[in-house]
Image (cartoon, rainbow, N blue to C red):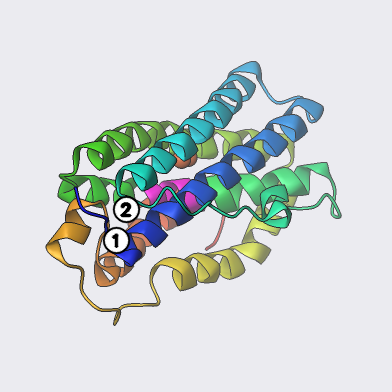
Amino acid sequence: MSAASPRVLREWRNRVVAEYRSAARTAALLHRMVLAGFPRDVLATAGRIVQDELDHADLCHVVVENLGGGDEPAVLDVGALLGPSEGDGLLAAVVDTVVRDFCLGETLAVPLFRAMWEGATVPVVREALTRILRDEAVHRAFGWRALDVLLELDAEGTRARAEALLPKWIEQYRAAYADRRDAPLLQAEERSAGLIDLHEYADLFETALEVDIRRRLRSRGIAA
Ligand SMILES: [Fe+2]
Ligand SMILES: [Fe+2]
């Protein structure tokens, strides 16, 4: 096929970086969970997720190459790969990654990737999104299970930290996903290469926030 539009290549290059960043941050999370004595099933799933995210980065890179953008490397920022610091203690750093990256990030990712998958017809894109979508449901479940363990270990500290930081994290995701409603609409080729319109992103974001995220937080005694 002919080379994809700059917008499509930029989006898939960004996904390579985002998936690799997820691998790095989950590896750091796994290390902290081992230190904090998390249950074996949680550690096993965290290990699986590191592998999944590396696979996702590879799959997204294959998409970039197949769409004609393989000549430009994806640029990684090592600072962004590090994730939260331990300035406020080990469990606080675990709460930060679990709530921000999993209870928010991975839970938002499921409906967004489903919408991308529904419109994708380019075979290599569909193959990548099929695998990613299947895995993200596991990653979402891991986040909420990990939050339940945190609540068993330190209910008060976990609730206080989550409630203090959730408004900032939600705004960061809203700025990344949902604040660009007036961007130019996608061409059909861009939709078939796995992109969705930004107003659709914005609507899916607000629905997932209310239906999937706030409800689950409230059921755990966390105000959001
Ligand atoms: Fe992923
Ligand atoms: Fe993931």
Residue at figure coordinates x 59%, y 35% from the top left: 146
**Could you say which is closer to the camera, residue 214 or residue 102?**
102
Q: Are marks 2 and 1 in contact (CB under 8 Å)?
A: yes
Residue at figure coordinates x 31%, y 42% from the top left: 66
Residue 111 in percent (x, y) is at 30, 50
Residue 37 in percent (x, y) is at 76, 24
Q: Is residue 146 above or below residue 183?
A: above
**Could you say which is closer to the camera, residue 93 or residue 14?**
14
Residue annotated with mark 1 = 204
Q: Which mark is residue 110?
A: none
Task: Name the amino acid type tagged 1.
Answer: Leu
Q: Is residue 103 visible?
A: no
Q: Magenta stretch mostly in which secondary structure?
A: helix
Task: Name the amino acid type tagged 2.
Answer: Leu
Q: Secondary structure at mark 1?
A: helix
Q: Which mark is residue 112?
A: 2
Decide: few, some or many residues near mark 1? Use Cα within 10 Å; few <14, some 14-19, many ≥20: some
Q: Quadrant of residue 214?
A: bottom left
Q: Is residue 54 above or below residue 109?
A: above
Residue at figure coordinates x 60%, y 69% from the top left: 168
Q: CA distance from mark 2 to mark 1?
A: 7 Å
The residue segment tinted magenta is 104-109
Left or right: where does residue 89 sit relative to residue 217?
Answer: right
Residue 88 in percent (x, y) is at 84, 54
Q: Secondary structure at mark 2?
A: helix
**Could you say which is closer to the camera, residue 138 or residue 26?**
26
* Mark 2 Cβ inside 8 Å of ligand 1: no
Count of marks overlaid on the render: 2
Q: Is residue 206 above or below residue 38?
A: below
Residue at figure coordinates x 67%, y 65% from the top left: 164
Left or right: where does residue 26 sit relative to residue 203?
Answer: right
